[in-house]
Image: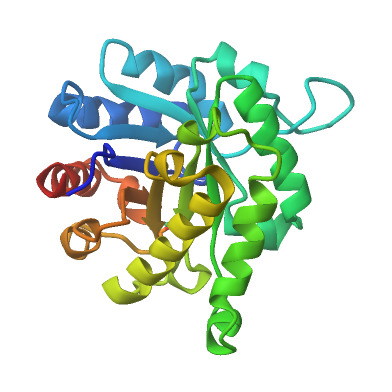
Amino acid sequence: MSSRKKLIAGNWKMNKTPADGVALVRDIVAAIGKQSDVEVVVCPPFTALESVGKALEGSNVKLGAQNMHHEASGAYTGEISAAMLRALFATHVILGHSERRSYFGENDEFINKKVITSLKNQLKPILCVGETLAERESGSTLKVVQRQVEGGLEGVSKEQAPTVVVAYEPVWAIGTGKVATTEQAQEVHAFIRGLLVKLFGDAVAQKVRILYGGSMKPANAPELLAQQDIDGGLIGGAALEARSFVDLVNAATAAK
Ligand code: PEP
């Protein structure tokens, strides 16, 4: 049992038109839109942010984006700024997702710029970290995660840190149906908590939510969410259907 409010965030990736997104959140809001035991965030593609945001009005479900650029404006074709996201009432932004790191070459330094910019603009960053299968098999999981956490959070102040969310997502578990065992996940979550203690002190580190991500489903969520340092989930596939997403929020409610 921890004092941290559990958080369930849905990462829709490159799925859902605005109309599809609105239909999905209508069902989610009808089922759990008024509950406040668990913080719930949906992260549609940029093109659906505005209409999904409108459909969320009056509910407790929050709006997040899947990425942003660190500059305020300018010649960055195809990019979106923090102020643009704020103008659409986004409260959260996923940064450094492994798909951004592997397909778009994002590194810790670049991701750190985005983290700093998001915080300056009152957007809560969900900083994703996690090792590949090769890194796990070569025994470098903790080293990789340490580099990503320390690199991603460089320059974040103690005052800002409680609004940061870290998502531990072993790359080999994302979209593969392979979920980390509760022991594997809790080990890395506890390690991340230790890194946060070193960076920000114990009191602040105890406030930071650390989510698990990687094939989290209603069937495996209760055991994962019962772990001491697992404060919620970043959900891909199971966030695309209201029933499974709502079941995950209910599992987090039961585990709180
Ligand atoms: C993700 O991409 O953040 C994710 C966790 O995906 P999935 O739940 O589909 O593994």
Residue that protrudes farthest toward the bottom in the picture: 138
* Quarter where residue 212 is shown: bottom left
User: Which is nearer the eye, 72 or 225?
Assistant: 225
Residue that protrudes farthest toward the right in the picture: 75
Residue lying at 58% horizontally and 48% vertically, measured from the top left: 199
Q: Is residue 188 left or right of residue 242?
A: right
Relative vertical location of residue 189 with respect to residue 111 in this rendering, above or below: below
In the image, residue 107 lies at what x, y percent?
Answer: 75, 56
Residue lying at 70% horizontally and 24% vertically, measured from the top left: 81
Q: Is residue 212 left or right of residue 157?
A: left
Residue lying at 70% horizontally and 38% vertically, measured from the top left: 155
* Quarter where residue 82 is shown: top right
In the image, residue 190 lies at what x, y percent?
Answer: 39, 63
Quadrant of the rendered image holding ligand 1 = bottom left
In the image, residue 222 lies at what x, y percent?
Answer: 16, 59
- What colouring style does the render use? rainbow
Relative vertical location of residue 135 with respect to residue 23 in this rendering, above or below: below
* Quarter where residue 193 is shown: bottom left
Question: Can residue 239 be seen in this snapshot?
Answer: yes
Residue that protrudes farthest toward the left in the picture: 254
Image label count: 0
Q: Is residue 37 left or right of residue 204?
A: left
Question: Can residue 235 be seen in this snapshot?
Answer: no
User: Which is nearer the eye, 252 or 27?
Assistant: 252
Q: Quadrant of the C terminus?
A: top left
In the image, residue 136 lies at what x, y percent?
Answer: 53, 82
Residue lying at 76% horizontally and 58% vertically, measured from the top left: 105
